[in-house]
Image (cartoon, rainbow, N blue to C red):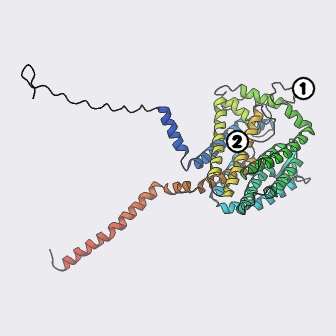
Amino acid sequence: MASSRTGRPPVQRAARRPATPRPPRDNPVRRLYANARRAWDRPLTAYYLILGGSLLITVLGLVMVYSASQITALQLSLPGSYFFRKQFFAAVIGSALLLIAMRMPVKLHRALAYPMLLGSVFLMVLVQVPGIGVAVNGNQNWISVGGPFQLQPSEFGKLALVLWGADLLARKQDKRLLTQWKHMLVPLVPVAFMLLGLIMLGGDMGTAIILTAILFGLLWLAGAPTRLFAGVLAIAATIGVLLIKTSPNRMARLSCIGATEPGPGDSCWQAVHGIYALASGGLFGSGLGASVEKWGQLPEAHTDFIFAVTGEELGLAGTLSVLALFAALGYAGIRVAGRTEDPFVRYAAGGVTTWITAQAVINIGAVLGLLPIAGVPLPLFSYGGSALLPTMFAIGLLIAFAREDPAARAALAMRQPRFGRKRAAVRGSAGAAGPRRWNTMRRRAAARSSGER
């Protein structure tokens, strides 16, 4: 070994370890995105979005109906909570319908399609019978049920068209008949036009637009060719233009798009004061119950223009929350329709989603001054029991379809109550230890009888 000048052996230095690369710093934005994406991909995401979103919209709608309808009720010499109590009663019945619908099997939903369609047509014919039908705001689309309660059969016609159209298209798809344009159109389009005709006899063009949107949604889901789809759309648009041109009231509503002044004869009074309500709300609103426009300035504050009162009292934060809830509901419905293998579930879920989102867009667009005032309520939010009941039943349909997904069904089966699992575990351990304890006692008794100590 070579020695140094001092005679001491040289110091051997340890070999350097290769530098290990440092782990990349955890980006909180990426982690949040990954967690959110993982949560969106879970089997029960659609189930919880539909259940939670619809519940929140309904509860917030009850609060806003109570706030927006007090002045109207007092002007009619009624108690301040009159409209709220009627809406709460309808919400209780609607909740029962939702629970029934979400527990019904898909076969029973399909069995209800034809009876519901026939019943809706019968009621819409009764609307036109003098002495039975009731006109509200110039539209004769109501039937007096008794006392202060009225029924609008056209709202149930939306649900009937969804169920019947989904069952019809599903049966034709099973027989591989949707490749022929005749089977795709007949009898779906004639029956839909019959419902539209019965609705337009009463003058309710807003509901007719929603029904047309449902028809187009079903045709789109069925894979209608572009030429066929464009042809039906052109016919519907032509009929709509003729109906608008021949009605001075509808022409006046069309001219109020983007209006900032009431105009001659206050023809745009409702549209302008809806904008005033939204503009005065600010970021967080003037406070619940502190709306100024509901004091007689804004017509239909608790029905068609309840979104304007929400913007005035809860501000931009409140309106964006409502929009987010409807967006989540629409996303969940599209997810249910896209992930199923059952054609009926796909058509029905797509039809319900089209119905709710289209009606929400038309109502909110009219309040914002972007669309003409169509006179349709905000789903699950505005006052009106006739609109709330079929909508909540349709929400129950979506929940039932979300539960029918195989992955969601397996996830729900695994989520048993903890108390039940503990009791089952205790029973299992007692059953396993019971025979051993009994055998030990038998051996002790036998030893004592034989004189063993």
Q: Name the residue under label 2.
A: 381
Q: Which residue is drawn at 79% across and 53% down?
A: 157
Q: Residues within 10 Å of mark 2 (few under 14, many from 20)?
A: many
Label 2 SS: loop
Q: What residue type is labelled 1?
A: Pro
Residue 11 located left or right of residue 313? left
**Residue found at the very far bottom of the displayed protein:** 450
- Res. 363 image quadrant: top right
Q: Where is residue 357 in the image (x, y as percent from the top left)?
A: 71, 43
Identify the secondary structure beneath mark 1: helix
Q: Can residue 94 be seen in this view?
A: yes
* Residue 127 on image: x %, y %: 87, 52
From this viewpoint, which residue is outermost toward the top?
5
Q: Which residue reaches farthest front?
A: 2
Residue depicted at x 48% and y 36% = 31
Return the residue nearer the eye: 193 or 227.
Answer: 227
Q: Residue 117 location in percent, x, y?
A: 79, 58
The residue labelled by disc 1 is: 264
Horizontal side, residue 295 vs residue 105: left or right: right
Nearest the viewer among 421 and 239 is 239
Of the pair 216 and 197, the residue shown nearer to us: 216
The mark total stands at 2
